[in-house]
Image (tube, rainbow, N blue to C red):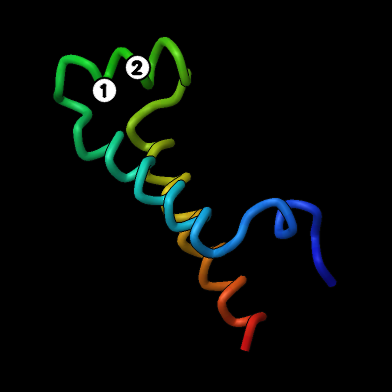
Amino acid sequence: MERPRDKMHDIDGRLFQARMWRDYARQWGSPWARPWCQQILRVSREECIRRARINLYLARRLNRRKR
């Protein structure tokens, strides 16, 4: 059963999102990343890591379905 969110994103899109969230979490100490995440995105470092993991999981799930 396909879910609507699976139709919106392919494996490459999920991996891209995971990389971006991981980069935000990794660069948390930089002068631009923390204010960007806290004020614009309104997420914490832990939330960035969580979203990166979620996108990796969804990419793996989409990859399994394509086989």
User: In the depicted view, which residue is nearer to us: 54 or 8?
Assistant: 8
Position of 39 with respect to 64 (left or right) is left
Amino acid type shown at disc 2: Trp
Position of 65 with respect to 36 (left or right) is right
Position of 10 with respect to 12 (left or right) is right
Please tell me which residue is depicted at 51% across the width and 55% down the height of the picture. Answer: 14
Q: Is residue 34 above or below residue 16?
A: above
Q: Which mark is residue 21?
A: none
Q: Residue furthest bottom?
A: 67
Say what secondary structure mark 2 lies in.
Answer: helix
Amino acid type shown at disc 1: Ala
Disc 1 packing (10 Å; few <14; some 14–19; many ≥20): some
Query: In the image, residue 43 lies at what x, y percent?
Result: 44, 25
Query: In the image, residue 30 lies at what x, y percent?
Result: 15, 22
Q: Residue furthest right?
A: 1
Q: Is residue 25 above or below residue 52?
A: above
User: On the image, numbered disc 1 is attached to which residue?
Assistant: 33
Please tell me which residue is depicted at 54% across the width and 64% down the height of the picture. Answer: 11
Pointer 2 with pointer 1, Cβ within 8 A: yes
Say what secondary structure mark 1 lies in.
Answer: helix
User: On the image, numbered disc 2 is attached to which residue?
Assistant: 36
Q: Label 2 to label 1, Cα distance in Å?
A: 5 Å
Number of numbered callouts drawn: 2
Please tell me which residue is depicted at 49% across the width and 60% down the height of the picture. Answer: 12
Task: Write down the quadrant of residue 26 in the picture.
Answer: top left
Q: Is residue 40 above or below residue 13?
A: above
User: In the depicted view, which residue is nearer to us: 10 or 57?
Assistant: 10
Quadrant where the C terminus sits is: bottom right
Disc 2 packing (10 Å; few <14; some 14–19; many ≥20): some
Please tell me which residue is depicted at 16% across the width and 15% down the height of the picture. Answer: 31
Query: In the image, residue 20 lies at what x, y percent?
Result: 36, 42
